[in-house]
Amino acid sequence: MEVLAIDNDLSLRLITEADDEKYITLIYENSERLEDSFEFLLSKVLSDYCWAYAEAVARFNQDDDYFNYLLYQDNSALPVGNISIQQIAEDKSSCNLAFFIDEEATQQGLGTRMLQKIVAFCFEQIGVSKIFMRVPLTNVAAKRTLEKVNFKQEALFQEEIKTFEGKYIDVEYYGLLREEYQLA
């Protein structure tokens, strides 16, 4: 099991098949908050296919072009967040991130610490040149977290993503270049 230690009380663990129930539960318990940002994820988890989806995530984690981690605090048995590295370009030029923190664990700086570790992993281990993330305009907390880690708002796209309820919403694209990361 691949573990990325953030510090003494926080770690990221690559999702395995043994984590299926924890992963599904974390998403389910935060589903209302995730409706605007994670339509695809919710469409799988809130369906009859949730267990097959969780198993697929664990299998995808065995490849070199997808990483999905659960965030654990103080050696807790239950995760307090999730972050995935997706859409890693074949030439390693870029990748996309998606993350959330459990509602009960917000406003503790966990998202910032988790994102800092994953950014370092993306640039130093995977070797990408750019990391990007798309964020609904209403997700102020995610935008603030990205800005704390030096991501810059690059573009606004109207009606870019479809929510779980089928409504199209505007998103902002945030990006971080390797050069900007190295200067921070």
Image (cartoon, rainbow, N blue to C red):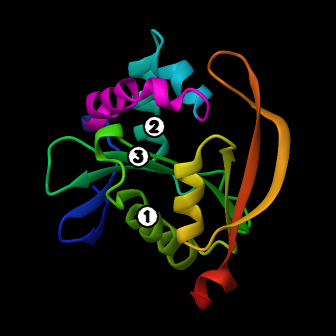
Query: Label 2's element?
Result: helix
Whole-angstrom CA distance, mark 1 to mark 2, is 24 Å
Label number found at residue 57:
2
Identify the main secondary structure in magenta: helix
- Asked if 164 appears above or below 80 in the picture, the reply is above
The residue tagged with tag 3: helix, strand or loop? strand
Residue type highlighted by circle 1: Thr
Q: Position of residue 169 (x, y in %)?
A: 76, 31
Q: Residue furthest top?
A: 48
Amino acid bearing label 2: Val
Left or right: 76 as drawn, with respect to 47: left
Rounded to the nearest angstrom, the CA distance separating label 2 from label 3 is 12 Å
Q: Is residue 74 left or right of residue 100?
A: left
Report crowding for label 3: few under 14, some 14 to 19, many 20 or more residues within 10 A (C-alpha): many
Position of residue 164 measured from the top left corner of the image (x, y, whole percent): 62, 20
Which tag, 2 or 3, sits closer to the chain's start? 2
Give the class, few, some or many, for how many residues have Cα within 10 Å of label 1's Cα (few <14, many ≥20). Answer: some
Instruction: Name above or below for residue 124 compared with residue 50.
Output: below
Give the residue drawn at x 18%, y 65%.
9
Distance between mark 3 and mark 1 Cα atoms:
12 Å
Quarter of the figure that contains the C terminus: bottom right
> Viewer-nearest of labels 3 and 1?
1
Range of magenta residues: 19-37
Residue depicted at 27% across the width and 27% down the height: 21
Labelled disc at residue 82:
3
Q: For the residues carrying marks 1 and 2, which lies nearer the camera in this image?
A: 1
